[in-house]
Image: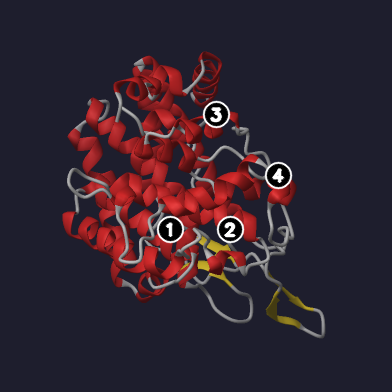
Amino acid sequence: MTSLFCLQLALGTIMTPQEQTSVISTAQSCLNEAPVTIVAFPAKGSAGGVHDYYSEGDYWWPDPAGTNLPYQKHDGLTNPENFVAHRETVMRFSVTVSTLVAGYKLTGDQTFARQAFRHLNAWFVDPDTRMTPSLLYAQAIKGRVTGRGIGIIDTIHLIEVAQSIRVLIRSGAITNAETEPILAWFRQYLDWMTRHEYGKQEREALNNHGTWWVAQAAAFASLVGDAAVLDSCRERFRNFLLPRQLQPDGSFPLELERTKPFGYSLFNLEGMAVVCRLLTRPGDDLWAYTLPDGRTIRAAFNFLSPFVRDKSRWPHPKDVKYFDLLPVRQMAWLFAADAFNDAGYMALWKRLDPRQGEGEIARTFPIRQPSLWFE
């Protein structure tokens, strides 16, 4: 990477002074927020207990032909009556912690770090409020199943929480005694993800679900120092994700087949970028990894970038929902700018709107704080 580009990627120029001020201001507002975990929202439909995460499949609706059960699928159309309180609470937790730690990193103010720890302790340690480190009851379908493997995608918002914890640990902002119970939670969840049948099912998914399983496993293994899982994730990217998902033209065909092809393509690209960012190491650059037929992850960026710059050029069907709200700023372009020394990707990232707005968009792009990902 050129020295000029290194300077451009310095934290002070990645984010404008106004953006840094905004992060710090939001972090200050988070100082007044008491931790709230999933136990505050009992799920009557759950087969689990108060500490167990629960959600219901987005695209499943009552059967209009009779008794309402079992629910029927309408792909791409979210049922607003489904239970989403736990999902929304995890998202708020992720936003709160990452904002507080970003505020700490930008200012050095320990007050932000200590407030972040309060939230982390509530979610992962305190026996009265902690979440069980498994997802047995996620993406349930009324009248069909009490949980599904694809529910693991609900915890993609813990990726930036894990990155926030890494920042706190490296800076010495939390003690070893405070850290270890939190790491124990992530070790247990990572073990469940890799050993339980739901986790195995999600890992084998051929679309964005498989991508985000690897992204989560890589993030949590990076946090707890699990070298074996990190190596298996690198192998997964090289021998499963890239060859089975990416076409020579850079498209993700299984995402293009969905009812929201633009959004799902961007979502999968984000997951791939997180995987490459977390797993690349000296002598093993996943950004540059090339399949025997010449395919690389950069092809996906080259495929999507013209449509992110000018959505009117999108040649596929429009998404059934939220097409008008896309694209938004997503970290994939910043990670790619760094990896490929590409000023065009940097400019694209900067011009995209950082406001995620609608909840479904916020759910889709869980990586929000650049200061946590660059030294």
Q: Amino acid at mark 2?
A: Tyr
Q: Secondary structure at mark 1?
A: helix
Q: Earlier in the sequence, mark 4 or mark 2?
A: 2
Q: Earlier in the sequence, mark 1 or mark 4?
A: 1
10 Å neighbourhood of mark 3: few (<14), some, or many (≥20)? some
Q: Amino acid at mark 1?
A: Trp
Viewer-proximal residue among 16 and 243: 243
Q: Nearer the observer, disc 3 or disc 2?
A: 3
Relative vertical location of residue 91 with respect to residue 299 in this rendering, above or below: above
Q: Amino acid at mark 4?
A: Leu
Q: Secondary structure at mark 3?
A: helix
Label number found at residue 264: 2
Q: Which residue is the site of mark 3?
A: 350
Q: Nearer the observer, disc 1 or disc 3?
A: 3
Pick the quarter of the image with the N terminus. top left
Q: Which residue is the site of mark 1?
A: 212
Relative vertical location of residue 116 with respect to residue 50 in this rendering, above or below: above
Where residue 214 sits: x, y (%)?
A: 36, 59
Image quadrant where residue 117 sits: top left
Q: Residue at x 34, y 30 (%)?
A: 374
Q: Which residue is the site of mark 4?
A: 325
Where residue 152 sits: x, y (%)?
A: 45, 63
Q: Earlier in the sequence, mark 3 or mark 4?
A: 4
Q: Secondary structure at mark 4?
A: helix
